[in-house]
């Protein structure tokens, strides 16, 4: 199975995913194996929503849209053009996936298979319906993948390398348990935004998408703001108001009510607008429905802090504060070459 064969298979998968939109799914006659998989996939999406209340139709549809846009021949070839895939020593790579947002482990799954390795997947119980079905689709449109994809709910056995994602606590366990295997171990990370007070209404509205998409559960969601001493939060609150309907969703509302009660009983100072609380705090990981903020005195001081805390930060959103700045509204639209934690997964896979 050569590289272009593998690329073609994922391009077909991207075309398959393009049919499933939030407002209306449209079955296309040109999609390979569609009669076998279209209705079954709609059923799996329904099961995913019923199983996990955070996986709303809107959130799942956004994930599928992003992956259908990413999985084009042009994008995949651009992503892979700098690597040398000759003489890959085929290994079995175990992936331990998180389950905070839909298909959060798909990039690792794609990377392992596109590199020519076998994959052994241990999914989160929160996200177990979608990926196995997509794996079956791949095996039908590209039969050479049969035998190369395995899912397990048991203890991992017979693998050569591992990619594992979890909390800081589980990462310590992973590091010990997999100490004799080549590995990528990912810990908690959060994203931040650096504001100056000169942002436009449009930029701040785009920032609200970075905050609220997926209810803020992803590592690419902005959970903290860095603001100058004289920052006026009124502009920020006005801009994020477009997300006010989120408070009508029960799981989010329950978290908002709980966290608000905790803050009030603890007599913490905070600001809130009926669906979002903002609280001054040096931490990076804020609870659902809460945004932390921290004042900065100078750009140089903040640059040093971000550099010191780089192992806690996934994305920095700003106009152009750092070289790796993400533009407002773009955190949930990563490219294939935007690696989690900045660690090149393909390079790792080609060296094992």
Image (cartoon, rainbow, N blue to C red):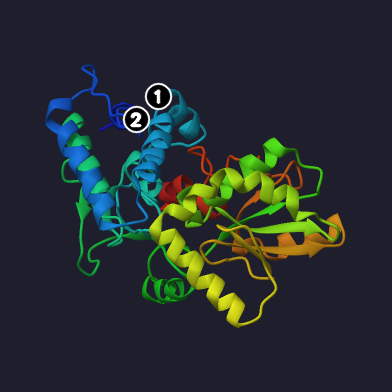
Q: Residue furthest top?
A: 30
Which residue sits furthest bottom? 266
Q: Residues within 10 Å of mark 2 (few under 14, many from 20)?
A: many
Look at the numbered discs 2 and 1 and tell me whether their residues touch, using CB distance below 8 Å.
yes
Q: Nearer the viewer, residue 149 or 39?
A: 39
Q: Dot 1 surroundings within 10 Å: few (below 14), some, or many (20 or more)?
A: some
Q: Is residue 341 visible?
A: yes
Alpha carbon separation for disc pair 2 and 1: 7 Å
Query: Residue at the location (36% across, 49% down)?
Result: 102
Q: Nearer the viewer, residue 325 or 21?
A: 21
Which residue is identified by label 1?
Answer: 73
- Residue in view at x 18 percent, y 42 percent: 43
Placement of 176 over or under 147, stated as above or below:
below
What is the secondary structure assignment of the residue under circle 1?
Answer: helix
Query: Horizontally, is 230 left or right of 250 in the view?
Result: right
Q: Which residue is mark 2?
A: 7
Name the image quarter holding the C terminus.
Answer: bottom left
Indicate the position of residue 282 as horizontal and vertical percent values: 69, 71
The part of the image, by quadrant, that contains residue 346 is top left
Q: Position of residue 338 (x, y in %)?
A: 54, 43
Secondary-structure class at tag 2:
helix
Identify whether 291 is placed above or below 261.
Answer: above
Residue 293 image label: none
What x and y, as percent, mark residue 281?
68, 70
């Amino acid at each position: 199975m050569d590289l272009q064969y593998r690329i073609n298979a994922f391009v077909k998968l991207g075309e398959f995913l393009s049919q499933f939109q939030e407002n209306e799914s449209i079955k296309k006659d040109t999609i390979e194996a569609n009669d076998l998989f279209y209705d079954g996939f709609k059923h799996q999406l329904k099961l995913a929503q019923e199983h996990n209340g955070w996986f709303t139709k809107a959130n799942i549809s956004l994930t599928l849209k992003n992956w259908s846009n990413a999985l084009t021949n042009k994008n995949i070839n651009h992503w892979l053009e700098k690597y040398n895939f000759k003489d890959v020593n085929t290994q079995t790579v175990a992936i331990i996936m998180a389950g905070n947002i839909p298909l959060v482990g798909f990039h690792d799954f794609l990377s392992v298979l596109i590199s020519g390795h076998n994959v052994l997947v241990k999914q989160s119980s929160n996200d177990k319906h979608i990926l196995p079905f997509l794996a079956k689709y791949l095996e039908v449109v590209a039969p050479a993948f049969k035998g190369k994809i395995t899912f397990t709910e048991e203890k991992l056995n017979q693998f050569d390398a591992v990619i594992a994602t979890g909390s800081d606590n589980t990462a310590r366990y992973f590091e010990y348990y997999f100490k004799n295997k080549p590995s990528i171990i990912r810990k908690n990370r959060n994203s931040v935004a650096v504001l100056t007070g000169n942002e436009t209404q449009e930029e701040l509205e785009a920032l609200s998408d970075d905050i609220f998409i997926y209810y803020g559960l992803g590592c690419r969601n902005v959970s903290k703001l860095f603001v100058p001493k004289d920052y006026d939060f009124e502009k920020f609150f006005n801009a994020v108001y477009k997300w006010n309907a989120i408070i009508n969703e029960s799981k989010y509302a329950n978290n908002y009510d709980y966290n608000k009660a905790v803050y009030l009983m603890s007599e913490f100072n905070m600001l809130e607008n009926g669906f979002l609380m903002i609280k001054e705090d040096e931490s990076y990981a804020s609870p659902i429905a809460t945004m932390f903020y921290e004042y900065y005195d100078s750009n140089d001081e903040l640059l040093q802090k971000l550099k010191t805390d780089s192992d806690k930060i996934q994305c920095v959103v700003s106009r152009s504060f750092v070289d790796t700045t993400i533009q407002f509204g773009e955190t949930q639209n990563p490219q294939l070459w935007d690696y989690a934690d900045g660690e090149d997964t393909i390079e790792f896979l080609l060296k094992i």
